[in-house]
Amino acid sequence: MDLLNIIVQGILLGGLYALFAAGLSLIFGVMKLVNVAHGDLIVVAAYFAYFVMQLLGIGPFTSLIVVVPVIALVGYILQRGLLNFTLGDDLPPLLVTISLSIIIQNVLLLLFTHDSRKLYGGAIEMASWRVTQDMAIGVLPVIQFVIAVLIIGGLQLLFYRSAVGRAFRATSDDREIAQLMGIDNNHIFAIAMALSLAVVAVAGVFIAVRTTFNPFYGPQLLIFGFEAIIIGGLGSLWGTLAGGIVLGLAQAIGGHINVGLPFTAGHLAFLAVLIIRPEGLFPKAVQ
Amino acid sequence: MTAIDQGSAPVGEAKPRSGFQVTHTSLSSRLGLIFWAGLVVVLIAVPYWGDRQTMRLLTEIYSFLALASLWNLLAGYAGLVSVGQQAFVGLGGYTLYLLALWGGFNPILGLPLAGLIGFVVSIPIIFLLLRLRGAYFTIGSWVVAELFLQIFQLVPAVGGGSGISLPAAVVKSIAASRDGREFLIYWIFLALVVAVLAVIVLLLRTRYGLALTAIRDNEMAAKSNGIDVNRTRTIVFVVAAAATSMVGSMIFLQKLSITPFSAFSFNDWTVNMIFITVIGGIGHVEGPIIGTIIYFVLREYLADYASTYLIILGLVAIVIMLRAPKGIWGLVADRYGWQLFPLARRLKRRESSPTASPQPGTGH
């Protein structure tokens, strides 16, 4: 029963990791940009939710109504005002987002100090379903998992079944031809970043309800998202979800063996996949 | 068969039958070498006239310059943007401590052994990381460094989370007097940074250097000209890892204690090196030198505001990447054609050439 419990916890946690990964994977798919500041932006979303909650006296989930559009707008502006100018070569986007990551961490440090914070979700945090005598499943993790799956499904639909999704795929395939066909690449990239950060906002609030965060928490989240992508296999959102679940499982099992082990176990799972199946567990057939 | 596997003839020497030869030196690089030689002589003499504080500052500058130059070799020449070099800094530090504690080694002997360990450990790492491309390599290197941090925290035999200190007896075994120790460590640091720069310059002058430059400029074109990109990258990575470990071992010898967080610090051993290199000029050997000077000058004024300082460096780095991606030295080099190291390759007509009409294009 204990093992089953660990597996369920791991899977539910994995949904959250897949959410970190989905935003990262979306912008990589569209513009081949790996946003090293992705994790720091998740933390920014969490701090912003904290601020909105204090200001309006609302709960973390209600705060999403404000946090998601604002963070998405930040994404649009960030892309049009800065990141679009770095595209085209390998080094500039990487080095600019690394610098951005350091800037964000230190600005957060100046604003909010090194103290750990948490978003309090109220009674729902404690609520759980009792499945058997010695196994209970938290309501909140289940809701978060379901929402994560819905968001990933929604992104998948958007990518393959909508006009903006078609524009994403077109710019991803060939920027210049897409531009010739009347697509404004700069705008499309900014929309992709806005969408990525909208997902980030949800992920940021979800993780901040589950665990404490501080200004330097971002890189860890970036690494989780990245590991989920590589374990799952590049280019497929459902693969990313599976990757997130594998990572969540590895961490849950590692944490059960030794309290200090969860992240180490996650990293080892990632390296094991890299050794045995470098293309990931569920790669997309056609690249 | 291919340009890079073409026997043993180094690129630096043209074949005798052609009427051309490749030279590396120019007036500015000759002046540059004279300048460096003079500077090194002055720096060797610092312990005899400088105070303790000057020596401390200089050793810190040497260690930053060495680490930044090695990062530049990886990122600026080999296209390996690693954010995990702290793995090797920490590994070098721990190697020296553990050898001294367990084996009773003189810490100075730990220096070459740290290099050896860094070299050996880096081989499986680069083998794995090369499976990740571009930016994914970057984050993968971070995961590896995180893993090092966590393992050293978990294992009680290496001190666990609280780390280890160097016992006084071990410290005394370096040299009997405090002055003797500080002089020796100072000279070792100076020798290390000179050696690192010399190795980088010499490496860049070999055919691997030419291959690296080709990879830097256009990976696809380099590949199609027969350059074994992965092999070249592997060589650069292991060389950089060995050297980084050696520098790391000396950094922690001077600190007298080591913890997993100080050893594998992302901010201390990687972020600073990225800013130094980007601001000074990535892809130029001179870049990290300029960057290190700027870094330490700025730090003199902003040392009390650590976060503000990092924010400013980050903003400057972003502006540089957008406006002058080759950094401050890149601007100078493009404008005046200066080089402080004999690295550029210029084709010259051989003056004493017996062939009357050399045919460009058929030669090397």
Image: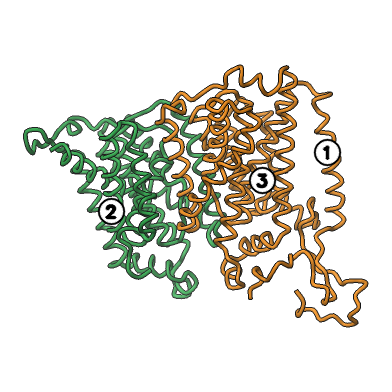
| Residue farthest toward the left in the current orientation of the protein | A133
- The answer to which quarter of the image holds residue B12 is bottom right
Residue A69 visible in rendering = no
Point 28% across, 53% down: residue: A241
Secondary structure of residue under mark 2: helix
Say which label, 1 or 3, has the lower sequence index: 1
Residue that numbered label 1 is attached to: B39
Q: Nearer the viewer, mark 2 or mark 3?
A: 3
Q: CA distance from mark 2 to mark 1?
A: 57 Å
Point 47% across, 48% down: residue: A36
* Amino acid at pointer 1: Leu
The vertical placement of A15 against A116, above or below, is: below
The vertical placement of B82 against A27, above or below, is: above
- The chain letter corresponding to green is A
Q: CA distance from mark 1 to mark 3?
A: 18 Å
Drawn side of residue B243 relative to residue B307, left or right: right
Q: Colour of chain B?
A: orange
Mark 2–mark 1 CB contact (< 8 Å): no
Q: CA distance from mark 2 to mark 3?
A: 40 Å
Secondary structure of residue under mark 3: helix
* Amino acid at pointer 3: Ser
Drawn side of residue A224 relative to residue B257, left or right: left
Residue B35 visible in rendering = yes
Residue that numbered label 2 is attached to: A241
Point 64% across, 69% down: residue: B5
- The answer to which quarter of the image holds residue B343 is bottom right
Residue that numbered label 3 is attached to: B69
- The answer to which quarter of the image holds residue A49 is top left
